[in-house]
């Protein structure tokens, strides 16, 4: 056989079977490895659902340690909400500024962490965060919870005599103890929320926020303002109990309030408190309430008078009124200063505006001098659970009287005619 012919036969007999063997091995071996699936981002971002509940936790202050407690409660409560509902948290605490999301079948997980420390009480930062959430998690209906410290309508300017924090406080220090920092006025909060979708309700999980002045300022941005005229427990709302009713469409406001109050009335929660004062204000009725109240308030405060508040229910029992006002109960003040006929007629407008008020006879107050720190409502029938500012010369020295002029309620009820 010629050398060249033997060479090609060698190639055919040796290498071709080897190639065929390798091909067979490849055909009969393990299946190719599938690529790793893309992780599911919690909350189904970009999908428009029935409800997005936003919990805005301004916790870079002495409440920082309570952030974990409440977020765990929310995580536990996710199992009770509908499949087309989601809960989105913005958390700003001593750790970081971040957004978390979860649904019934998806545990609460962090979906965005801001590289820069967000100031949760700065108007530009708050608007940016809330717009981020709305863009990521669109919905037919929104609910909003504002979680932090609070002091009602009182202006947030800080002086040596009167440090204030209308809504929230951000110390900017990643510090879980300091309450020195930036606060937000309610007039500023209203302007921020006007740039965002209308909400079915706004729940203040913060002390002293259920003032008529606050609710009236927010009347165009939400259907209901929910909050307490007094202090609330440090652990805040009973999220594990009320998450389902908050996420329903329409929101079950009555059940939400009753479950919140019962949680503390029955001694549940982190601490065995004996009650909680909570009400819901229907904002569509506030202008009617202002019109009904105007002639009486002008008479009560005429010629720059401070009305006699002996026996009128109040919600702040601290020694210093440089920190808070007395937060007198609006309904109880009217009960003491109107005739029987006037009061009965005025109550029609009030009860239309405040349809839900499951008040409890007592509540816990750190400011109370009682040994058990309990405060008491002495006239349950004629107490409404919404506070009203009663002016005095002492507040003029603080600059609060002048700041009060900036609130829509002041103008709506004609307080400028009184000299205050």
Image (cartoon, rainbow, N blue to C red):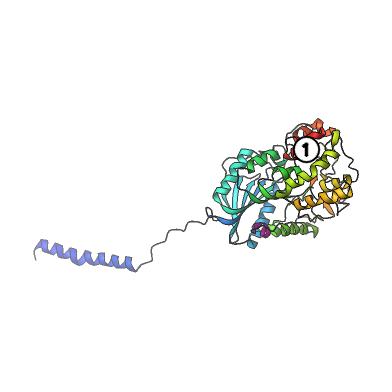
Query: The magenta stretch spans which residues?
Result: 243-251
Residue 49 relative to residue 345: left or right: left
- Magenta stretch containing residue 245, yes or no? yes
Residue at horizontal 61%, vertical 40%?
A: 125
The residue that label 1 is drawn on is 414
Instruction: Please give the count of numbered marks on the rendered protein.
Output: 1
Question: Seen from this angle, which residue lies furthest left?
Answer: 2
Residue 255 or 287: which is nearer the viewer? Answer: 287
Quadrant occupied by the C terminus: top right
**Magenta includes 383?**
no
Instruction: Give x and y (percent) for residue 301.
Output: 84, 37
In the image: residue 407, left or right of residue 86: right
SS for dot 1: loop
The x and y percentages for residue 69 are: 69, 53
x and y, in percent, of residue 281 in the image? 74, 50
The reply to whether residue 42 is in sight is no
Position of residue 16 relative to residue 184, above or below, is below
| Quadrant, the N terminus | bottom left
Residue 382 in percent (x, y) is at: 85, 52
């Amino acid at each position: 056989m010629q050398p060249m012919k033997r060479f090609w036969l060698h190639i055919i007999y040796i290498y071709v079977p080897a190639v065929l063997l390798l091909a067979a091995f490849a055909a009969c071996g393990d299946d190719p490895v599938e690529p790793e699936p893309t992780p599911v981002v919690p909350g189904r971002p970009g999908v428009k659902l029935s409800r997005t509940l936003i919990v805005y936790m301004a916790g870079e202050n002495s409440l920082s340690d309570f952030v974990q407690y409440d977020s765990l409660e929310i995580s536990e409560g996710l199992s009770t909400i509908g499949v087309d509902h989601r809960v989105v948290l913005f958390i700003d605490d001593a750790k970081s500024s971040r957004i978390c999301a979860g649904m019934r079948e998806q545990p609460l997980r962090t979906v965005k962490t801001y590289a820069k420390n967000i100031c949760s009480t700065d108007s530009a930062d708050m608007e940016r965060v809330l717009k981020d959430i709305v863009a990521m998690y669109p919905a037919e209906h929104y609910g909003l919870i504002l979680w932090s410290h609070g002091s009602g309508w009182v202006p947030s300017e800080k002086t040596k005599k009167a440090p204030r924090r209308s809504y929230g406080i951000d110390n900017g220090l990643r510090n879980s103890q300091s309450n020195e920092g930036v606060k937000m006025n309610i007039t500023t909060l209203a302007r921020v929320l006007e740039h965002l979708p209308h909400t079915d309700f706004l729940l203040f999980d913060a002390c002293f926020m259920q003032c008529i002045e606050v609710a009236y300022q927010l009347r165009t941005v939400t259907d209901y303002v929910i909050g307490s005229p007094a202090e609330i427990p440090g652990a805040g709302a009973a999220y594990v109990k009320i998450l389902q009713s908050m996420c329903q469409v329409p929101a079950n406001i009555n059940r939400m309030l009753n479950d919140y109050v019962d949680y503390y009335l029955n001694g549940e929660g982190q601490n065995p408190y004996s009650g909680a004062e909570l009400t819901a204000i229907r904002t569509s009725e506030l202008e009617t309430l202002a019109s009904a109240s105007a002639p009486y308030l002008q008479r009560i405060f005429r010629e720059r008078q401070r009305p006699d508040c002996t026996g009128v229910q109040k919600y702040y029992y601290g020694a210093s009124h440089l920190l808070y006002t007395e937060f007198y109960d609006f309904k109880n003040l009217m009960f003491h200063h109107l005739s029987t006929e006037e009061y009965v007629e005025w109550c029609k407008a009030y009860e239309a505006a405040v349809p839900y008020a499951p008040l409890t006879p007592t509540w816990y107050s750190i400011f109370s001098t009682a040994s058990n720190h309990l405060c008491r409502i002495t006239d349950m029938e004629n107490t409404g659970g919404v506070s009203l500012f009663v002016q005095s010369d002492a507040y003029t020295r603080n600059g609060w009287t002048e700041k009060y002029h900036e609130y829509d309620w002041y103008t709506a009820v004609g307080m400028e005619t009184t000299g205050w």
